[in-house]
Amino acid sequence: MTSKQRFLAAINRQVPDRLPVTTHHVMPYFLRKYMGGISNDAFFDRFGLDPIRWVFEHRPDPSTRDYFDPDHTPGYLAPRWVVSDNWRITKTSIPDPQYLTERFTFHTPKKNLTIVLQSNDYTSWVTERLVKERDDIDIIASFAPKPVCDVESVNRIAAEFGERGLIRGTIICFDIYGQPGTWQDAAVLFGIENLIMATYDDSEWVHAFLDILMKRKLHFVDSLRGAHIDILELGGGDASSTVISPKIFDAFVAPYEQPIIDRAHAVNQKIVYHTCGGMMPFLERLAAMGPDAMETFTPPGMGGDTDLREAKRRIGDKVCMIGGFDQKEYFASGTPAQTRAAVRDCFEAAGQGGGYILCPSDHFFDADVALLEAFGDEARACVY
């Protein structure tokens, strides 16, 4: 099988020729520090992993007067900004002795909204939330552009990539620092602690907020028909069982995620639901939303709670499972033999009958190259 065929067989819960093996986003920090700055494609070749090509191809809705920001240059995992005369984005540097700190201002006719990000060599994080007052969501509803998929660009990339591997995208995120899931996007914009408290103090407002974000995502999903994307990511760690209760999941997560999954299926797209954190109490709830795959099945050593064998027993006949590998334990320390044993453990726990893709449980930044070699080599030896 080609890598693409191998991936698709697993996603369709079929049995491939061998265990598909890959990783989540390949972090620029790792490539710079350990690999001499090689490309993502070269990384996959170097370690014999099944490649993924991420696509973030969207464009202004041609039925509007929205346009690409002429002053914005996209960065890592950052698509071009879509703006309008009523939704302009400016960036201001803030002096800080330790971190790159930047304030982004959204200029609208009624009110300006601001968000502050900090960054280091590893990653970025939010230090000032965009949504500060209840009526800020009305500004988003009134003025935020609703980009659509650039199907032609996606298909050109897919054709060039061919059988090399998986074409993977995401449901559209909010500008600057959003994430694919509706609840997750809201958590980024308002703060997860604030959002949880608001579900008790002002549930009507939370529902209105989530509905605004969901409708923007549905608008994007409707534009995906004909796009040659193999799978699209939805979800986020703030919807995990180590963050929220089942009651909150049932009331505020599933009602705003399942419609996106259903709409994606209606335009012949597949969804992987990403939950980096606790999953075991939510397994059936997550699977009931109807995603084609679920990830990340984070083990306890990485802050999750996954028993991979038990997860396979409970939902392995409903979704493809992606992840489950402890990259902290077996990429950064130990021996190649221990890494190989961990690969075999994952294969024996979740690989039987197909429907499983071996992958670290989310990103990694530091890793021993010899352990990565052992990871890929052992996985390729896991033959059905």
Image (cartoon, rainbow, N blue to C red):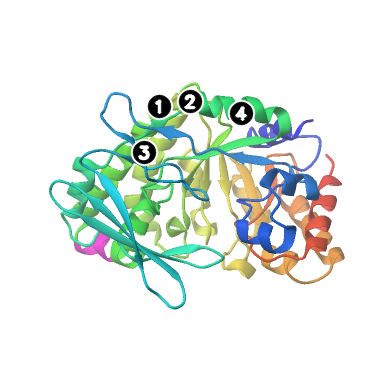
| Disc on the earlier residue, 3 or 2 | 2
Residue 55: image x %, image y %? 54, 37
Instruction: Identify residue for label 3.
Output: 217
Residue at (24% x, 44% y) in the render: 87
Query: The disc labelled 2 sits on which kind of residue?
Result: Val
> Total marks drawn?
4
Mark 3 or mark 4: which is in front? Answer: 4
Residue at (37% x, 58% y) in the render: 188
Residue 65: image x %, image y %? 25, 29
Instruction: Identify residue for label 2.
Output: 151
Instruction: Identify residue for label 1.
Output: 223
Give the magenta range: 197-201
Mark yes or no: residue 130 visible.
no
Helix, strand or loop at label 3? It is helix
Q: Are marks 1 and 2 in contact (CB under 8 Å)?
A: yes
In this rendering, would 294 be left or right of 371? left
Helix, strand or loop at label 4? It is helix
Instruction: Identify residue for label 4.
Output: 158
Residue 72: image x %, image y %? 40, 46
Relative to 44, is 149 above or below?
above
Name the residue nearer the viewer: 376 or 120.
120
Residue at (49% x, 54% y) in the render: 282
Q: Quadrant of the N terminus?
A: top right
| Disc on the earlier residue, 1 or 2 | 2
| Disc on the earlier residue, 1 or 4 | 4
Helix, strand or loop at label 2? It is helix
Instruction: Name the image quarter holding residue 84.
Output: top left
| Disc on the earlier residue, 1 or 3 | 3
Query: The disc labelled 4 sits on which kind of residue?
Result: Ala
Query: The disc labelled 1 sits on which kind of residue?
Result: Ser
In this rendering, would 107 be left or right of 276? left
In this rendering, would 134 be left or right of 123? left
